[in-house]
Image (cartoon, rainbow, N blue to C red):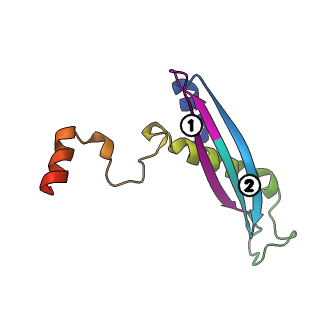
Amino acid sequence: LEIGYIEAQLDRLFLSWDWEVNSVQNIANGIVVIGKLTVLTLTGNKITRSGVAGVEIQTKVGATTLTPDAIASKAMDRDPGRAEAYALKNAASKLGNAFGRGLNRDFNYEHIPDEKITDRIFNNQ
């Protein structure tokens, strides 16, 4: 899901929300961002979810090692922002399917009627 869609869903579903970056680290040839998403529900409850993401630092074509000369122009302008956006998406996905939680899952347990869950548990179906 695109970050613009995630932000629009947060605006639409919650009274307010806040994204706080806790850490930005350069690890090997990548940038890792860790952050915290806090949302205020319609009932006044606050929910907090952590998000983490890493992106590879873009290098020039043919570069074999990460040296200052090998880093692509504007990579350091783009890549930290990309990592932050992915970390926000990661945190939001933990809020539910409206944010893509079940996109890569083969089965969605939220849509099993209660009686079918009971049958599966007690009858091994």
Q: Is residue 16 above or below residue 2?
A: above
- State whether residue 82 is above or below residue 16: below
x, y percent for residue 61? 74, 70
Q: Which residue is mark 1?
A: 6
Q: Is residue 71 left or right of residue 83?
A: right
User: x and y percent of residue 112 in the render?
Assistant: 24, 42
| Neighbours of disc 2 within 10 Å: few (<14), some (14-19), many (20+) | some
Residue hosting label 2: 79
Asked if the magenta segment contains residue 38, the reply would be yes
Circle 1 Cα neighbour tier, 10 Å, few/some/many (<14 / 14–19 / ≥20): some
Residue 88 picture quarter: top right
Q: Of helix, strand and loop, which one carries label 2?
A: helix
Badge 2 amino acid: Asp
Q: Residue at x 78, y 57 (%)?
A: 75
Above or below residue 59? Residue 90 is above
**Residue nearest the viewer, comparing 58 with 81:** 81
Q: Real-space Cα distance between discs 2 and 1?
A: 19 Å
Of the numbered discs 2 and 1, the one sitting upstream in the chain is: 1
Residue at screen point 80% across, 63% down: 72
- Magenta stretch: give its range: 37-57
Amino acid found under the numbered disc labelled 1? Ile
Q: Foreground: 92 or 72?
A: 92
Q: How many marks?
A: 2
Q: Which image quarter is the C terminus in? A: bottom left
Residue at the spot 55% in from the left edge and 41% down from the top edge: 92
x, y percentage for residue 28? 74, 70
Dividing the picture into quadrants, the one containing residue 55 is bottom right
